[in-house]
């Protein structure tokens, strides 16, 4: 093994150990039993963030922790005049259960709106594929907002196939494919789209979409853990499991505060991750230059 290879292997081992440490420390926040324990854990960690978040992996772990804390109501608080989530859902004839937090409710994901499936129009009909309606498949699910897709279908395809038009402000999710081994891609539609058979769409009341999208990101580890794997390796989210997942829902006013706070924190995380990547690139260039000089000497 060359010197460079040994240095890289050592660096990877150190990063893996650091990621495990960060995960363990941040887990103490998400697993706190009450507000006092949470505050104590936060104070213990607050002065260490600069030394903890030193790699892209550690920043990703922190981002997931932010999401987890957000849907637990730990980043914000319910305020007077926030209203009641149960009453807000009742306006849309959505039934929910009581939550331990005042003003919050618990609701099954599948109760939050109409569920739509996808399909693939016949490839033997070129006219089905000559339109301008986005046809979203898992390969398009690389961002949180979908305004277009790699493939497009026509109105003729909608008329002559099981395809359904998914309205804007719906939530798309991948329910079949190898990506589910480690992730659960979700996104909001910015325009009306269609989807393929490896996808599902949920059409909730528009006001609830931003928080639901955030909640599904926060629940990604739990959702991935429910994925079924066939004997030949296919990964699939069984509908009964997916739609029965329960989400804690705060009043809309608090939802807006939570989404705003998370957006702010995740933007800072992305900036930090970019700076770490830039610093790593400079370090790599320096290491290569030093090795080149040593070999040439």
Image: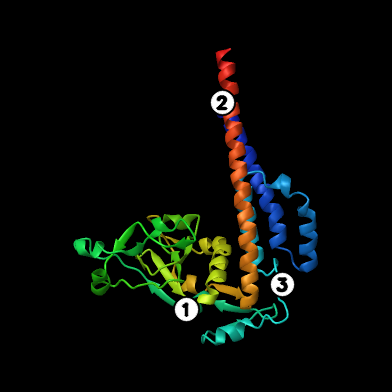
N-terminal of the pair, mark 3 or mark 2, is 3
Asked whether residue 172 is in view, the answer is: yes
Badge 3 local density, few (<14 within 10 Å), some, or many (20+)? few
The front one of 216 and 12 is 216
* Residue 113 circle label: 1
Residue 119, relative to residue 287: is it above or below? below
Badge 2 local density, few (<14 within 10 Å), some, or many (20+)? few
Q: Are marks 3 and 2 in contact (CB under 8 Å)?
A: no
The front one of 20 and 52 is 52
38 left or right, relative to 213: right
- Seen as rendered, the residue at the extreme top is 297
Residue position marked by numbered label 2 in the rendering: 288
Q: Quadrant of the N terminus?
A: top right
Q: Quadrant of the C terminus?
A: top right
Q: Are marks 2 and 1 in contact (CB under 8 Å)?
A: no
- Please give the name of the residue rendered at 76% of the width and 58% of the height, measured from the top-left corner: 42
- Please give the name of the residue rendered at 65% of the width and 58% of the height, measured from the top-left corner: 265
Q: Position of residue 43 (x, y in %)?
A: 80, 57
132 left or right, relative to 211: left
N-terminal of the pair, mark 2 or mark 1, is 1
Separation of disc 2 and disc 1 at Cα? 55 Å
Q: Position of residue 157 (x, y in %)?
A: 25, 69
Q: Position of residue 178 (x, y in %)?
A: 42, 55
- Please give the name of the residue rendered at 55% of the width and 63% of the height, measured from the top-left corner: 217
* Residue 77 circle label: 3
Residue 288, relative to residue 152: is it above or below? above
SS at mark 3 in the image: loop
Residue 207 sits in which quadrant?
bottom right
Separation of disc 1 and disc 3 at Cα? 26 Å
């Amino acid at each position: 093994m060359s010197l460079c290879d040994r240095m890289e292997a050592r660096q990877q081992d150190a990063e893996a150990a650091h990621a495990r440490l960060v995960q363990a420390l941040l887990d103490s926040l998400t697993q706190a039993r009450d507000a006092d324990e949470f505050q104590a854990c936060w104070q213990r960690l607050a002065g260490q963030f600069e030394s903890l978040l030193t790699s892209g992996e550690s920043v990703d772990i922190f981002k997931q922790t932010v999401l987890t804390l957000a849907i637990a109501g730990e980043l914000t608080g319910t305020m007077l005049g926030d209203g009641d989530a149960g009453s807000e859902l009742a306006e849309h004839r959505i039934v929910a259960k009581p939550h331990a937090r005042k003003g919050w409710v618990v609701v099954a994901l599948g109760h939050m709106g109409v569920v739509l499936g996808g399909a693939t129009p016949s490839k033997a009909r070129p006219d089905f594929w000559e339109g301008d309606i986005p046809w979203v498949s898992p390969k398009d699910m690389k961002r949180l907002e979908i305004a277009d897709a790699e493939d497009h279908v026509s109105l003729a395809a909608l008329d002559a196939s099981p395809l359904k038009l998914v309205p804007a402000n719906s939530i798309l999710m991948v329910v079949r494919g190898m990506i589910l081994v480690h992730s659960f891609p979700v996104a909001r539609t910015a325009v009306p789209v269609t989807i393929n058979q490896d996808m599902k769409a949920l059409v909730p009341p528009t006001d609830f979409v931003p928080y639901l999208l955030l909640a599904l990101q926060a629940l990604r580890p739990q959702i991935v853990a429910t994925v079924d794997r066939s004997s030949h390796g296919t990964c699939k989210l069984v509908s009964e499991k997916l739609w029965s997942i329960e989400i804690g829902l705060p009043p809309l006013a608090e939802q807006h505060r939570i989404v705003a706070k998370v957006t702010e924190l995740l933007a800072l995380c992305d900036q930090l991750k970019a700076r770490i990547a830039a610093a790593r690139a400079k370090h790599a260039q320096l290491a290569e230059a030093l090795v080149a000089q040593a070999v040439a000497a």
